[in-house]
Image (cartoon, rainbow, N blue to C red):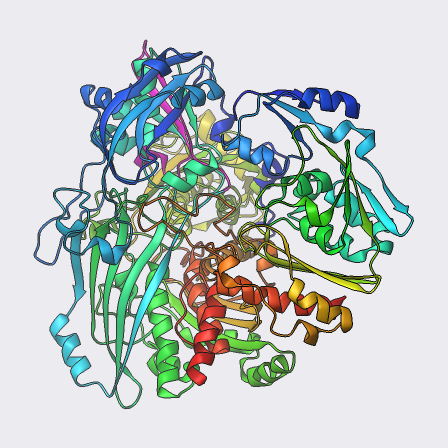
Amino acid sequence: MGAEGLGARVLRKEDKRFITGRGRYTDDYDLKDTTYAAFVRSPHAHARIKNIDVSAAEAAPGVVAVLTGSQLTDDKIGGMICGWMVHSKDGSPMNAGAHPAIAVDIVKHVGDQVAVVIAETNGQARDAAELVEVDYEELPAVVNLKAAVKDGAPQLHPEAANNISFDWAIGEKDATEAAFAAAANVVSMDITNNRLVPNPMEPRVAIGSYDPAEEHYTLYNTSQNPHLARLILSAFVGVAPEHKLRVIAPDVGGGFGSKIFVYPEETVCLWASKRIGGRPVKWTSDRTEAFLVDAHGRDHVTEAEMALDENNKITGLRVHTLANIGAYMSTFSSAVPTYLHATLLSGQYNIPNIYAEIDAVYTNTSPVDAYRGAGRPEATYVVERLMETAARQLGISPVELRRTNFITEFPHQTPVIMAYDAGDYEASLSAALSASDYDAFETRREEARSRGKLRGIGLSCYIEACGIAPSAAVGSLGAGVGLWESAEIRVNPVGTVEVLTGSHSHGQGHETTFAQLVNERLGIPIENVQIVHGDTDKVQFGMGTYGSRSGAVGMSAISKALDKIEAKTKKLAAHLLEASEADIVIEGGQVKVAGTDQALGFHEVALAAYTAHNMPEGMEPGLKEGAFYDPTNFTFPAGSYVCEVEVDPETGRTEIVQFVAADDFGTIINPMIVDGQVHGGLAQGIGQALLEGCVYDEDTGQLITASFMDYTMPRADDLPNFQVSTTKTECPGNPLGMKGCGEAGAIGSPPAVINAITDAIGNNNLSMPATPLKVWQALQQTSAAAE
Amino acid sequence: MYQTTYHRPATLDEAIKLGSNDEAKYLSGGQTLIPTMKQRLASPESLVDLSGLSELQGIRADGGSLSIGAGMTHADVASSAQVREMIPALADLAGGIGDPHVRNMGTLGGSVANNDPSADYPAAVLALNATIYTNKREISADSFFNGLFETVLEEGEIITRISFPVPSKANYQKFDSPASRYALVGVFAARTDGNCRVAVTGAGNDGVFRMEAAEGALSASWSADSVGKNRPDPDDMIVDLHGTGEYRAHLVNVLAKRAVTAA
């Protein structure tokens, strides 16, 4: 390992600009003659629009235009789409209701767009937006999943009876029922996975700019995948032709999934810029809008059952989940509760029979889509709560129950599509148990009791599927796109390197880790490597960053392109050094004839490629290579987490006194960045378990937790010092052996926390977020039951 | 935020003159008012910033009392050696308000005049039986607070100082609301010249209140046992996402005992 190569703890190159306030985010772009957009948003969860009077707004100071949904329709701009087709059990396609970028007849959630005001300043736009008079006829609303599927519930989309977009199933129903019929023990639970608001630090921004002379559009936006945005906006929404649309996603301040999707505001800004003659239109979300209209995460209600035989081997798993998709189907909303969730229900365990039914349900709430982990936290929560509960019910150690059922041979085909390629679950479990001094827990519990505290311990052994994804496989499952990645390596004549990547960095540190890979292969210092991303004019195509795919897929593409650079470099050097190509090696920035002192600097070979004065027969000048990499399988990061808590029985407050994470991410490029990714993931997972809960009023559909006054974001003092470590089994499916680490913390931690608290309080009936109030109420139940 | 006009007068008289306009609002730190304006839920025509008034500054011993200028920030109070020496519980309370940003901007006078039912200072003012001095008069703590966000302050009246009698024992116990970190329940217990007062913030649906039922027993014997099973009626409590009436009433009892024990 070199000082800057694979495995080195290199400080992040990008942090210089970020920590000195010189990052350049979308809102930092001030184009000449910019106008500002303010959206008129529905105050009702469900209402018919009877009339919109824009006259007062149009007359307000500084107003350039006031635009409504009917004008959008007149201009034949299409609605938002869901890009993954899922079919119901009966083979019928999902019922995706219309999602206009600006509502025309009916608003379906609080915050739905009704009109947009374009003005000279942001303040003028907001002032005028309040002057748009909308006459609403309020309709009954439904936000609760179980209420939404009942007969007689308010209906959101005419094509979706009982608000069900699709009822999908996976696995073998009959075989699973037979397993339950023959079971020695069955464990049943009702499990709720709470709704979350993503809340990246940087709110969403869109700047649409139309050039009438060139008939060309530019969109600056806060996107995790600008090429996908361009594809959808051109091919499906139809706001601009693909070759006449440039999408730039510059520095992006956190995404967590919420910036994957193509949202109405981007369409409106592009369209409005053309409508007003080409002045740029800029919209910057405020925090309230972020709460109201950014796609939320999770929100499942699940009935889950596990069947076990007399030897405590799991024989079956049966799950029925209602998944909230909100008022409209967001870009990947159909894939999250299905292929990213139910395919992981085997966990780390040998489970011969699994049957899962997922009903995707419309409600009068913000759309729900992928959020850090996307489906896999929901699956892990179901499996790991069941494991802990089963162990308690059977009176055996939760460690032993897991060990009894671990998958130990690879590859392993689960009954729910996934074929696990490699792993060593015992290794991470042992590492976690040892780091947490699990065996001495009862002594700590006693000591805590003497201080009046209830101490508990909880485990979670998670698996997830990352590195999404093999294009043919996801295509057969309904994806509208392939999930490969592209890369281009441009070696400059002086030997410095630009890497153009379709991955997008919004906190992951690509500018450092991708450069480390170049350093490993070509030996040039990382400061001589520039990573170019986030601009569809620079990078030909790419699929962006989500699903922990940038390492396993994005870097694999870079690696393939580097193979080609190396090959050409060697061939050219062999020619220049009059040596055999097979004898050429690239080491430490030198291109050498192995075993001799003959060598050229890498920069000398690069220069020779561009001067082209002395090239091998038939070789083209230049040193630039591209590659597309399509993975052959998902990757399967896995690990074991141990959470230890102390609960104050008088107040219900939980303190996490120890949190141990032992993860297997395969090959690691930069351990410091991986530690940071795990820390961040754990903060979000613990946030979900203890703090974060998005709540709508059941009657009115108003978002009650619409600000940080009511929605609890995790703060540093809510979190313990994490003990993180890694074990390693290389992923056999990609050239670097990488699995991905971006989501693991958020996936694995919630059940560990809840398993620990329920262990402490002796009551398994506890839902997330486990606020002091809920824990205290659960304790009251425990003591009432004891009396 | 709507358009507004900002004034920063240098004298109390000028501030009163500027504040006599019905559409004006005094700004004393602005940790509630500014966010409310940013949410477009308040639209004062003008803001009269009181931070430039020397009359509202300073912390000093005043006989058996500690007199704190209404314009002193929470950070000033938390870090004052004088406060720490005379009423450490008050310094602790100020140091536990919000976060550093809030503490560097928010002021004693602003907090007390706003009388947010979940603010910390009103509990101290009531439990310590403080006297509120304004540009017009002095008001006893018992007659100052008047329900949610209401006080006996008249239009244009400005708190200049608050004088806190120095207790022999005092402690403030705060149980944070998880999201806002305002007090879900806060209990200030104090013993001054043999008299005990216990004031509760965050809990009551009519704002800060005294736990009078426990005060007599505490005056007789300063111990957690004296609090006993005393707790307010759950029906009189604030109910929100983070606390039912039962829970808040229970916490009042728990925190009162802890405050007495810790004092």
- Residue A127, picture quadrant: top left
Taking the magenta stretch, the answer to whether it contains residue A204 is yes
Residue found at the far bottom of this picture: A310
Farthest top residue?
A213
In the image, residue A70 lies in the stretch drawn in magenta: no
From the viewer's perspective, tell me whether residue A533 is left or right of residue A99.
Answer: right
- Up-down relation of residue A304 to residue A301 (above or below): below
Quadrant for the N terminus of chain A, please: bottom right
- Percent position of residue A436, x then y: 56, 75
Tell me where residue A130 sits by quadrant: top left
- The magenta segment is A201-229
- Tell which of B220 and A279 is nearer to you: B220
Q: Would residue B47 appear left or right of A184 to someone viewing this image? A: right
Q: Is residue A637 above or below residue B62?
A: below
Q: Is residue B48 left or right of residue A528?
A: right
- Is residue A621 visible in the rendered structure shown here? no
Query: Measured along the vertical axis of the image, is residue B229 above or below residue A77?
Result: below
